[in-house]
Image (tube, coloured by chain):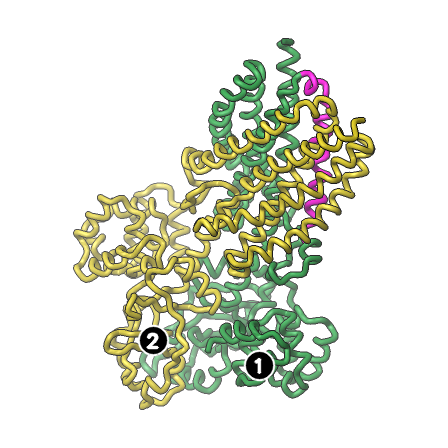
Chain colours: A green, B yellow
Amino acid sequence: MHPIEIVDIMRILESSKDKTILFRLLSTEKSALVFAELDANEQEELISSMNDKEIEELMHEMSPDDRTSLFEELPEEINKKIFSLMEKEDLDITKKLLAYPEYSVGRIMTTEYISISPNFSVNQTLEYIRKYGKDSETFEVIYIVDNKNTLLGYILLKDLLFANRTDIIENLMHTDIIYLSAYSDQEEAVLVGRKYDLLYIPVVDAKNALIGIVTIDDIFDIAEEEETEDFHKLGAISIDDDFTGNIKQAPILTLYKKRITWLFILVFINIFSGYFIGIFEETISKYVSLIFFLPLLIDSAGNAGAQSSTLIIRSLSLGDVKKSDWLFMFFKEIAISSILGITMSLAVSLLAIFRGGLMIALVVSLSMICVVVIGSLIGLCLPFIFVKLKKDPTTSSVPLVTSICDITGTSIYLLLASIILTKINI
Amino acid sequence: MHPIEIVDIMRILESSKDKTILFRLLSTEKSALVFAELDANEQEELISSMNDKEIEELMHEMSPDDRTSLFEELPEEINKKIFSLMEKEDLDITKKLLAYPEYSVGRIMTTEYISISPNFSVNQTLEYIRKYGKDSETFEVIYIVDNKNTLLGYILLKDLLFANRTDIIENLMHTDIIYLSAYSDQEEAVLVGRKYDLLYIPVVDAKNALIGIVTIDDIFDIAEEEETEDFHKLGAISIDDDFTGNIKQAPILTLYKKRITWLFILVFINIFSGYFIGIFEETISKYVSLIFFLPLLIDSAGNAGAQSSTLIIRSLSLGDVKKSDWLFMFFKEIAISSILGITMSLAVSLLAIFRGGLMIALVVSLSMICVVVIGSLIGLCLPFIFVKLKKDPTTSSVPLVTSICDITGTSIYLLLASIILTKINI
């Protein structure tokens, strides 16, 4: 049975005693795989039900990268207890990995890979794999290093299969190797893994020495986490979003805390719209029918802004658009949004003539073009500004863009109205 | 050099002649890999510059799944021309794969895998791989089938390495096999691949016979496409979004067409807000300071709705929340949004007292609680409604949710105002 299926069964069990019993029934090897798939609080629960011997065995069996992420999640005092139970060798590896910065490649890599010398023969290599390969996370790829552990190349297990037993690795190895630095951001691993369709990416230190590998399952997990983070940021759920849990299970107060910050900030941003309305109070009370079109115009500004910001944010994160492209995209957006604005302006002008007369229709039509163009440009520029400030472009969430566009839209509309209507002086 | 790096170089070249020259310099094997990585229009350009012999060779060298996606993109007349040049065997496979529904697993699978009988010995298997393996996309996994081609299990290349040469496969094979139906949605491949961290997923037909495999690189590509689609839908960019191209390169008219539909629909939805304002025109002209708080309240409704819909949409697509959970989530959302609404109501009440007096403050505070709760519930329910209608939940984009919340917010605010202010009759 696949570890994930065992996790599914464990989650159906109500009592934590039953969970522990099921967990104890598994082989040590299987239990380490199952344990790695559990949530932080489930791991904590199990650990507290285990004796010292069981903890020691479990820690030894877990892969180094799974262990690193475990210690990231558990409370400090439990970590200390587990550290005291671990074998020295395992502990050294764990401490080394935990020394890398949070969200760096070093934190997600594993040290269980196979590396050999370039002057090994195929036969020697196969022997070596049979001897030391059992513990490795992979030996579909075997890395080749010199005596300073500098990464020289790699060879695939299948290459060995088609080679002669006496061939020397140096003559067979691939040297077009793609690797990561342990200090790179985890996001880099996702980008590189996706771009080159890699199942394993070797990781090197500052001296180009091989120190670990990142495996596809970790890349998958990070990709999913980062995307959830992007979605949540785009929906203005949390500013410093590290919430990737299950919203069905999350406590109400946690969700409240995640959501209130942005809502609160946006309330105060929106008060500006009120001030602009205050400025133009005279015009409004003279032409009350202007208010009829207010929600329509401010929403159109917001919607156009939401579109352009979503498009640009996604393109920035995929690498289709770069920071330096902003001026090109700016002019392109002017062209697109102008046609969008004119189309929408034509759509509402008839209604405006019918509802408010010719002059109001003129104001509404002109405003529609302006707010759509300016809203789109705000939506486009905000993500670039965040990138410039070295922040995640996704921080310019749709609600933030919408709110800023709303204020701008309100003021453009009322300004145009007061100028045109006062000038013409009907 | 990695095929992707060659593609990068080709894209830097300006003239299409230079591109063709570079492409011709590659070995047939490499050129097929490079070709598969190109965009549809780049592929079309190259094809038109190739002679019949070159096209035939290229088609033969390409993997069946890459070929399927090529024919999906190219114009019909070019497809016909290429079909006429292809070898019969290749053509049969291609036609078989193209017969599966669009966006099905059948369209992305490859037929180049290795399958053996359970009574093979390890030695026989290794011989078989050496003989037939070169053309296979993978032989890290070898599938085991009976004489009707029914999938029985699998064995890893590394298992063979540690086994005795005379062991029989039946005794070594893993039977906890996870597979897909050729008729399943592509999204299923992403979900299964991610859940079980699989590099290759076998695909079976209606009779459980093995007919292909899906490989991780295709899963990566689909995941990226589907996420881009989700982002774009969430930003109300396109209703039937199949636009996954590069927005920097996309023509202005294409982007215009993608964006105008939703903007147009939303304009007409927003006219309703105007109608509600029309109904309460009397109240508004009596208490003009009400308008001061209008943008603030309608935006708060929209922002709360954007949050809850984004959270639920992402959870539905990850499978954390299921269709049947809607009632539970509904009550949970009532609790969360009530606390959110009360917090925000406290924040604006002081301003409201200062700006509009005690009675206006009462109206604004009460409205704030109501619009946040009702906005959040709209944002929560809309995705579930789309799922119920068998549509993608992401169709309930943030701008759509915002617009509906805006109308509701406007009417709640003005309704409460007219009731309270008329009743009290200041």
Estimate the x, y position of residue B348 in percent, counting from the top left. 76, 39
Asked whether B204 or A315 is in front, the reply is B204
Mark in the foreground, 1 or 2: 1
Q: Residue at x 71, y 48 (%)?
A: B340
Which region is colored magenta? A258-286
Q: Which residue is mark 2?
A: B142
Taking the spot 22% from the left edge, 52% from the top edge, the residue there is B55
Task: Chain letter for mark 1, please.
Answer: A
Quarter of the figure with residue B91 = bottom left
Q: Is residue A250 left or right of residue B117?
A: right
Check the picture and name the quadrant holding the C terminus of chain A.
top right
Q: Judge whether residue A239 is colored magenta.
A: no
The reply to whether the C-beta atoms of the residues labelled 1 and 2 are less than 8 Å apart is no
Q: Is residue B172 left or right of residue B393?
A: left
- In this rendering, the answer to whether A163 lies above or below A290 is below
Magenta segment, prevailing SS (helix, strand or loop) = helix
Judging by the rendered image, the residue that carries numbered circle 1 is A23
Query: B23 above or below B280?
Result: below
The secondary element bearing badge 2 is classed as strand
**B185 on left or right of A40:** left
> Foreground: A359 or B282?
B282
Label 1 neighbour load within 10 Å: few <14, some 14-19, many 20+? many
Q: Amino acid at mark 1?
A: Phe
Question: Label 1 vs label 2: CA separation?
Answer: 31 Å
Please indicate whether residue A51 sits to the left or right of residue A156 in the image: right
Give the answer, above or below, for where A162 lies relative to A360: below
Report helix, strand or loop for mark 1: helix
The crowding category of the residue bearing disc 2, from other C-alpha atoms within 10 Å (few below 14, some 14 to 19, many at least 20), is some
At which x and y percent is residue A61?
57, 82
